[in-house]
Image (tube, grey):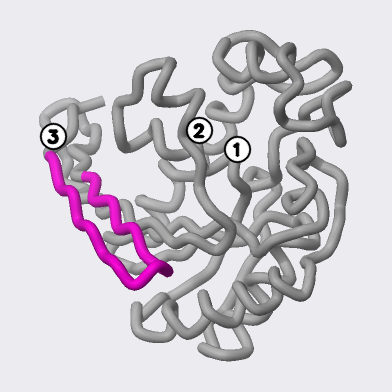
Amino acid sequence: MKIYVARHGQTRWNLEDRVSGRTDIPLTDQGWRQAEQLAEEVAGLDIDLMIVSPLLRAQQTAGVIARRCGIPMSTDERLIEFDFGVFEGRHRTDPEFRAIRRNLAYRYPEGESSFDVAARVFQLLDEIQVKYAGKTILLVCHGALARVLRTYFVDMTNEEFGSYMTDNCKCILYETDCRHTDNNRYKLIADQKENLEGESKICSEEKRFF
């Protein structure tokens, strides 16, 4: 099956390079334009269902796609952005924030760790592959969450994880081959599709059993 992952359109805090977690802020005018562009791209992908973060910026982005493409959408709390705790709203260059970002098991004070987020996101991905086997699904979510989600499919070093970013309304494809193995687990094949800039790059590699 195919699982596409798209980040929401631009918000004012994205523009100001501020840490954006659970604060529920809307799209900017540019964010709405990005959502329209994403909808044009998604129109040709034969998406069966969108699963969307409950936060406004993701809901607005997905709403544009739903209206343009007629794709049904549902909301799942497990796609909500990181809880960045005390760092919410701070500038992203804050040295303490950047240090914690690279420590996967360390919780942001009064917030979540990457491991916390992985627990809920991986559960959702496992569920999607069983419930929607053979379907094409689009997840509309957030930048930091998309970084954790990527580790479900692609091995990353701590340095790669810390520096990985998904641009606003960028759409990435992860293709999974859900063939049961002897221990009843999945063999996954991950494809990355980078687009919106007029260039497509498909990188396919067979992944581990897990």
* Three-letter code for the amino acid on which mark 3 is drawn: Thr
Q: Quadrant of the C terminus?
A: top left
Residue 83's x, y, as percent? 77, 31
Which residue type does callout 2 highlight? Val
Q: Which marked residue is nearer to the observer: mark 1 or mark 2?
A: 1
Task: Give the quarter of the image for residue 155.
Answer: top left
Please provide the residue range marked out in magenta.
190-205
Secondary structure under badge 1?
helix
Q: State which tag comes first along the sequence, 1 or 3.
A: 1
Residue at (70, 72) in percent of width and height: 30
Q: Residues within 10 Å of mark 2 (few under 14, many from 20)?
A: many
Write down the residue under mark 3. 181
Q: Which residue is mark 1?
A: 144
Q: Quadrant of the N terminus?
A: bottom left
- Specify the label residue 148 is tagged with: 2
Amino acid beneath label 1: Ala
**CA–CA distance between discs 1 and 2?**
7 Å
Tell me the SS state at disc 3. loop
